[in-house]
Image (tube, rainbow, N blue to C red):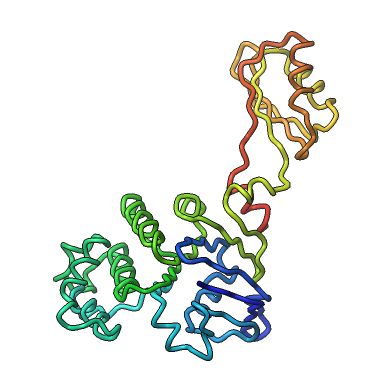
Amino acid sequence: MIEVKKVSKSFGSTKALDEISFSVKKGEILGFLGPNGAGKTTALKIITSFLPQDEGEVKIDGLDTIKDSLKTRKRIGYLPENVPLYEDMTVYEYLKFVAGIRGIEKNKIKDRIDEIAGSCGLVGMLKKPIEELSKGYRQRVGLAQSIMHNSEVLILDEPTTGLDPNQIVEIRDLIKKIGEEKTVVFSTHILSEVSAVCDRIIIINKGKIVGEGTPEELTGRAELDEIFNIKIKGDKEKVLRQLQAIEGVERVEADKGEGDNVYSYKVTSKKGGNVREKISGLIISQGWNILEFNKKQVSLEDIFRKLTK
């Protein structure tokens, strides 16, 4: 549905995007993840024809976004990072205006607004002037306008900005529902967003794609240190010394202890170092009382930090 091939974009001497390529299938929810200034918004503006790329091409359903700009825009719903709203209008007036310019038949506009208002939690806000709305409700209005024309592709730039935790869950559920039938791309720097919503993730940093795949695939490919958390009852200095002596262990850290000679240790080794059995064997041979032993699971946050630092 969306094809991006070797797209580059510069602003003066700053290269915002550097030959990025990816595709998104119909019915897929793609999370565009990256730190502030990574190039996420620039990429989305190019996909939606708000900005032309310097190099490369973008196609929506086989149509080129530059050669067939008007046709591709009709297939896209777009929620920009900063939602442009007419504050002197009521929510209903604004959505009616959007419905008109999106070509919805006049006799169907009211029903469509009612449907979208229910989906986006705006039923009680339709008569209110937009200038009186909180930031969270303004975001909902922006989302409502983006899905007004029932587009095939939905592009959302930071869609949950300004929402409270309950509203975030509601918008997540709405995005997942939309993604059952449509292609959805949304950008964020909030890691929990992509874990909760996305089928696939692209991580971008300094204008380049540095990671791509499902959360599980990214976790499996991550070359990260392995960390074991162990709680042992025994002489602290002896435990530290012998844990550190294990082949493959890079470092050992101990906390201040819980009294009665009980300390927690953080043991770090390179991935594939196979130190778990060695640690277990040492504990058994020394007769130490083990109160806790677990391996820290690699998280999306760990991967994100490794790929974007």
| Residue 272, image quadrant | top right
Residue drawn at (38%, 60%) of the image: 175
- Which part of the image, by quadrant, shows the C terminus? bottom right
Relative vertical location of residue 275 with respect to residue 170 in this rendering, above or below: above
Relative vertical location of residue 168 with respect to residue 135 in this rendering, above or below: above
Residue 67 appears left or right of 287: left
Label total for image: 0
| Residue 111, image quadrant | bottom left
Tell me where residue 241 appears, x and y as whole percent: 81, 22
Residue 287 appears left or right of 36: right
Residue 134 appears left or right of 225: left
Tell me where residue 170 appears, x and y as whole percent: 32, 54
154 or 138: nearer the eye?
Answer: 154
Tell me where residue 232 appears, x and y as whole percent: 67, 17
Residue drawn at (31%, 76%) of the image: 149
Tell me where residue 64 appears, x and y as whole percent: 53, 85
Residue drawn at (33%, 66%) of the image: 139
Residue closest to the far bottom: 67
